[in-house]
Amino acid sequence: MSGESQVRERAVWQPIDTGQLLLIATVGLFVVVAFAQVAAAGLRQPNVAIIFGVLIALGELFRMVMPGNREVAPIAGAGALGYALLVGVGPEGAAKDAPLGVVAAEHSALQVVAVTAVGMLVGSLPHVAVGRWPRPDAMARRLFTVALVALCFRPVLTLDLPWQLLLAVMSSVVIASCFTDVLIAAVIRAEAVRVRFGIALRDEVEAKMALCAATSATAMLIAVATTAMGEAALLIFTLPILVTQFAFRRYAGTRATYLQTVRALSRVTEVGGYVEAGHSRRVSRLAVAMGRELGMTEEELLELEYAALMHDIGQLSLGDPIPGGATVLASPAEQRRIAELGAEVIKQTGVLDRVAHIVQLSSHPYRTGREPVTDDSSGEAESRPLPPPLAGRIIKVANAYDDLVGDSADRDRGAAVLERLRLDSAAEYDPTVVEALSRVVDRLPRQ
């Protein structure tokens, strides 16, 4: 399974994600109650509700997918949070004794949920019309975050707090909502891709906190500016998050292009008849699954995926292809030569040096693998008996397994190959990695 664009495609052996079901059910209950409350009490300040609803719909229309297949809609999020945090709608027409000298925002927390739900639904319709269905868990998480902010902040407005204290409460609520969103996303991701919660949490923090901070800051700007200037402030203070979204979209596009290029390169060996069809893809899927079992971070998994896809590219230098492309049957010297030539090809990209290093050492035995290490005392490089990096050890095991099993789903054949790898664990393969492969294979569908 790809660490970048295929996380969403669940393997058939994975169980139903109960975390997602619970989140969607909870948000669904919120929405039902919100619609019932609005239907009973009526829509307060409908002009304001419509303006924010349109902003949320436009944000959903321009949602994007970030690395790790994270669906985000920062403009919609900023608009919805801004509506939840709204104190007033400008000074025009305000009564002399009105708080802060503005027309007070009269909508309830449940009205925020209802308007946000309608805006998200309307903004998603064009995507649905062309077959791009939204991710229910991502939409539910965004709506849950907005509901949390509204339920915590709207009641505070009844306390008639000073403006400075109100800003402090507003900041505290949005910060708490950011951490809640990241925490829920980590719980869902940990269950979905079978990774330890601590690793999933760290990945979510690294991937989302910058965008979450930008979205929250823009939401506060929208709420404060709309209170002071009226609805026209929405146009001005939505621009920062729009610029941020374009920057993140460009970053995501660059990473997607890298992955597509690597996948195209990995198929060269298949097209040339050097390896069996699908070999690189199978090794990549096994390697990424094993990396997750062993607690690798998302960035490490991406490098592992790149290296696994291109681990056999050095075979293009061979005059005569190895029968079946099975490098596990080649001599150790030939395996190292293929890995080193492949690493040289990868280095020519100028941006994948760490991936090249992984590929170069993926042929080294676990116990006797060596790599140059600088001696701190003399400053000279020397060769010490160090095991290859974890990514290299994973690729070595995954490649050997697929070389001997291929696309066969025969459980007995797979068990025999695993036993052979265990017997070679004394020197050739990392026993911890072999056991990780065993757990991954056990989750494969039975024939």
Image: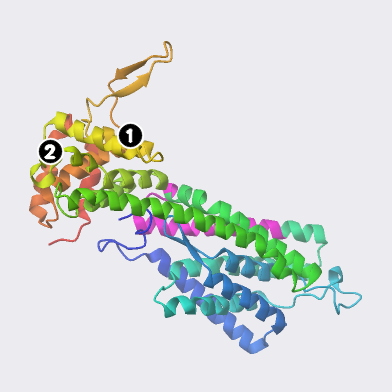
Q: In front: 428, or 29?
A: 428
Q: Which residue is mark 2?
A: 319
Looking at the image, residue 428 lies above or below residue 406: above
Q: In front: 146, or 21?
A: 146
Q: Which mark is residue 357?
A: 1
**SS assignment at label 2:** loop
Q: How was this image coloured? A: rainbow
Q: Position of residue 15 (x, y in %)?
A: 30, 63
Q: In front: 158, or 273?
A: 273
Q: Amino acid at mark 2?
A: Gly
Q: Residue furthest right?
A: 96
Left or right: 333 in relation to 15: left
Q: Residue at x 19, y 61 (%)?
A: 445
Q: Position of residue 303 (x, y in %)?
A: 36, 44
Left or right: 18 in relation to 182: left
Q: Amino acid at mark 1?
A: His
Q: Residue at x 62, y 65 (%)?
A: 78
Q: Residue furthest front?
A: 319
Q: Is disc 1 surrounded by few (<14), some (14 to 19) or many (20+) residues within 10 Å?
A: many
**SS assignment at label 1:** helix
| Nearer to us: label 2 or label 1 | 2
Looking at the image, residue 92 lies above or below residue 188: below
Q: Position of residue 11 (x, y in %)?
A: 28, 61
Q: In front: 296, or 405?
A: 405
Split into 4 quadrants, where in the image is the C terminus? bottom left
Residues under numbered marks 2 and 1 in contact, where contact means CB atoms less than 8 Å apart = no
Q: Position of residue 256 (x, y in %)?
A: 41, 55
